[in-house]
Amino acid sequence: MPDDRIPFESTGPYTSPFDAIRHTDGEREFWLARELSKILGYDRWENFENVIAKAKIACKFNGHDVDDQFREVTKLIGAGKGAKRSIRDVQLTRYACYIMVQSADSSKPIVAHAKDYFAVQTRRQELANADPFARLSEDEKRLIYRAQLALYNRKLAQTAHNAGVKTSQEHAEFTNWGYKGLYGGLTENDIHALKQLAPEEEISNWMVSEELADNIFRAAQTDAAIQRDQITGRENAYNTHFTVSRKVRDFIINELGGTPPEQLPVPEKSIQQLQREEQKRIERKLQPPLFDDSEE
C-alpha cells in the first residue's frame, strides 16, 4: 500500500522546501516564482511562464484579483564584472501557488508534495463569506484534512527517523503502533480489513473528516512528545507513538464523548476520486467561455 512513511536522510529540523522559500513583508506572505520554479524542477524560466499564464486565467475565472495574487516585480542580479541587470519575477500568494501547481508537470515527484502543501488554504480562499471553513462540505473538509495529515505524517516520519527509526520496515512498524493506540488495539491490517479496502488502497484515503482530524491530532502530539522528551531508540519511539495515540483515543472518547475512530463510517469516495473531481473543476475554470453572452 502506498503511504506517507518514507525514511529521511536529513537529520536537521523538518522544513518543507516551500517553507524555506516563503517570504513575508510585514503585511503578506508570498513566494517568488523563480524560486518556486527551481524547486518544482523547471530548468527554463520560459516553460514556467506558461504555467503562470494558465494560473492567471484560472485565477480570473475563480473571481480573484489577478494583480493581487500575481504581483509583477523586478530585481537586479549580477551580470559579470560587477555589472547588474534587471530580471522579471512574480510575487505569488498561497492561492496563486496552489493554482499553479495544479497546472505544473505532474510527472515531477515534488509537484505532488507541492499540491499537498498549498491545498490546505485553497477552498477557504475561494469562499468569500466571513466564516468560509464552516461552509465547507464534508468532501472539501476531507481534501483539506488529508493534505494536512500528509504533511504531519512526513514531519513525524522525520522526527522518528532522527530518534532511531531508520528503515522502511521500522517506519511501517512505528506507524502500526500509532494505529494500535488510536484504534483500540487494531493493527493497520485490521483497519484495512474493517474498511473492506482493496490491497493497494491506503487507509487515510478512506477516512471521513473526523477520522482524519483524529489522526492529525495523533501525529502532531506524537511528534511533539518525541522532540520534547528527547526520545531516542527505535523501541522507545514505538512506545511513545502507542502511548500518545492511546491518550488521544481516551481524550476523544472520555473527555469529548466522541466516536472511536474505528466506528466512524467509511466514505463513499476515496481521496483520489475527490482529487480528480476537484482537478476537473479547476480545469473547467481554466477554459474561457467560447461565447460572450453579455449584451452589447
Image (cartoon, rainbow, N blue to C red):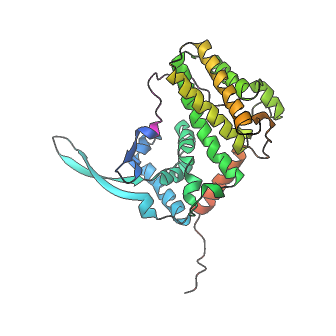
Pinpoint residue 264: horizontal percent, then vertical percent. Answer: 79, 40
User: What's the magenta bit mostly, secondary-structure-wise?
Assistant: loop
Work out which quarter of the rendered image holds the C terminus and state it.
bottom right
Magenta stretch: give its range.
1-18
Residue 196 vs 83, above or below: the answer is above
User: Number of numbered discs present?
Assistant: 0
Q: Is residue 6 magenta?
A: yes
Q: Does residue 177 show up?
A: yes
Pinpoint residue 119: horizontal percent, then vertical percent. Answer: 57, 47
Q: Quadrant of residue 188?
A: top right
Q: Nearer the viewer, residue 24 or 249?
A: 249
Q: Along the horizontal axis of the image, is 14 left or right of 176?
A: left
Q: Does residue 2 show up?
A: no
Q: Is residue 143 magenta?
A: no
Q: Residue drawn 60% across and 62% down?
A: 285
Work out which quarter of the rendered image holds the N terminus and state it.
top right
Q: Residue drawn 73% across and 34% down?
A: 254
